[in-house]
Image: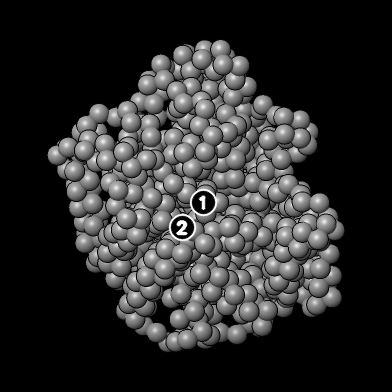
Amino acid sequence: MLETAPPAASAGTGAARTALMAAFGFLDWLWIVLYLFIMIGAGVLFYRLGKRSESDFFLAARGLPWWLPAASVYATHTATDTPMWVSGVIYRHGLAGLWYSFFAGWCAISAFVSTRIFRRSVAYTQAEWNTIRFSGLGAELLRGWMSGWQVFMSMFILGWVGVAMGKVCNYVFDWPVWFGLVFFSSLCAIYVMAAGYWGVIMADFLQGVIAFAVILLVSIWGVVAAGGPAAIVDKLTAMGEASRLNPFAFTGWFTGDFPIAWFATMIFIAVLGGFGMGTSIDWYVEAQRIQSARTVRDASYSIWWGTALVLMRNSIWAVAILGFYVLYPDISSTADYEMAWFRIGFDFLPVGMLGFFFAGIVAIHISTISAVLNLGAMYFTRDLYLHYWKRDATERELVWVGRIATLVLLLGSFFYGLIMEEITSWLIFALWIMAAGIWLPNILQVIWWRFNAWGYLSSWIANLGLSWLVVWVLPSFGVIPELPDYQQFWVLMVLGAMIYLPITLLTKPDDMDHLVRYYVMSRPIGFWGPVRREAERRGLLMTARDAMAEREAL
Amino acid sequence: MSWIRREWTPASADEWTREDWITIVVSPIAYMLLMVGVALSMLLLPAGYLVLAAGVLATVFMHWVIDPKLKVISSEYEKRQREYLEEVERRTRWEENDG
């Protein structure tokens, strides 16, 4: 997920950890045990619903009111490492750092454009959508690639988020990192395997409520510890750091830590990305929430409100981190100030509330783990097993395959989590390249009828090569200077377009029958003139003249 | 505001209209105002209250514009959803070819 960030390399001293363990009282442990009991109970409670069918196990039978997937959108956008990442950018940049978290802003337009289009396609997954939107061999190649990639990505995200939890447990209890990774992810897998998406969504709702309460409580506690809101403002002003209170404290057009060019690129990517599908890697998780909503309207509101809550949560965190900055302004180690929000909780909350705080951290953690476990299992079951392996599988069989896939993903995530330190920098690069060069193709596939499977496939392949060249190879040979990330984005977008646009135009358009069926079902926005006219000619859609007459009659 | 349509037929609601574009413009603005407004309001800065109030108003306005249309799209689409679901299932199980 784009809201995730690399786990801190180290966290706290041994002495601090020992003191923290001693501070846990009976009430603290009671909070934690109670919370875990409720979560696993959700799996048992919804076991019967989850096992009814594939649709139940992965989409809760597409029957959820908007506020349930909205809570899930919020909960899954809140991972263990999210407070580390938000703490880091706010400590470095002040309130201007909020714009780093505005990546979630793609949901502003998506809620009313790509969400509507995707919900109407009734595809289980983005990979399945590829074969609804495109046709022929290219579409099948895309589906195979997309599903394999998503299974891998799920495993990677599970390992990434899991190891962050391992480090938090190491900080709090001095447990080995592997134990925190394995213990909580395994508990979470119990209810995901038992009840599938029903368990995920119901637990997410509880976790969302608990996590928000904890975030609010701890953040207010932090603000009070810093002397209150007015004192934070006064102290920052006295320190000559009043610019930290300004969300628009730019450092120039192209210079400094927070240039206008970076901000403009971020807003452009985030907001316009909502016209497409997959412009953010969070899309793949949210796509499942979209399909689980009972109507198009519920899907739209779930995405909009879930993300609104995410952005407001970031603001609450940000103010607490400003308070932390006022208390500890001289921390230079990234690994240390990224733990700011955790330190507020563990340093300032009284005994009896520490357990509630830790239960909140566990809630934050396993809401992400459960969502990604079920998502990866869905891609494996629906797109790989059912579509390419056993097309006559029964519903019961598909549910069992979903459970086994969940277990395999869990075990794979342990492997990734434990080698994460070595591969993190490579994989961050992989995530970046996935976002940059295919950003525009992800939009074109939604808004332009002529964009075909070969164009989309070639954009992925071209991007893999070009990103290595632009980010690493050419700068290391001095052919081009090392570019800031926002400039890399524009360069990769233009270079990629020079490859996939000619390929699109030199290969045949998708089959018109296929396009007409997709258009009538999904009613996409954008440049679909020839397909629209063909649908009207076949009598499948009302012509503009008929629509005008109907409107006048109304 | 007569330029905002509040009553829709199923066919007209399926089209992308001015109301969608107003929502597309207002929605990101509402997000930005809410995010900045909450942060500044928590610091008890007067500008924060104004920004937050503007964010709430933008959110209410956006829903007022788009909700009638979304309701009609949803109720009409539900009637056809079963047929589409069966079609997608057949395609995934290789029981149907295009054309």
User: Which secondary structure lies at badge 2?
Assistant: helix
* In the displayed structure image, the side of residue B95 where residue A178 appears, left or right: left
Q: Which residue has dot 1 on it?
A: A6
Q: Residue at x 30, y 62 (%)?
A: A186
Displayed quadrant of residue A219: top left
Q: Relative to the observer, which residue lies in front, A350 or A309?
A: A350
Quadrant (top left/top right/bottom left/bottom right) for the C terminus of chain A: top right
Q: Which x, y percent locates residue A449?
A: 74, 66
Q: Amino acid at mark 1?
A: Pro
Residue projecting furthest to the left: A26
Residue count near mark 1 (Cα–Cα under 10 Å), binned few <14, some 14–19, many ≥20: some
A56 up-or-down from B72: above or below: below
Residue A63 visible in image: no
Subunit of label 1: A
CB atoms of marks 1 and 2 within 8 Å: yes
In this picture, residue A400 sits left or right of residue A297 = left
What amino acid type should be assigned to the residue bearing mark 2?
Trp
Tag 1 and tag 2 share a subunit: yes
Q: Which residue: 35% across, 25% down?
A: A221
Real-space Cα separation, disc 1 to disc 2, in angstroms: 7 Å
Q: State the image coordinates of residue A459 (x, y, percent, origin top left).
A: 73, 67
Which residue in the protein does label 2 denote?
A160
Image coords of residue B30 (percent x, y): 59, 33
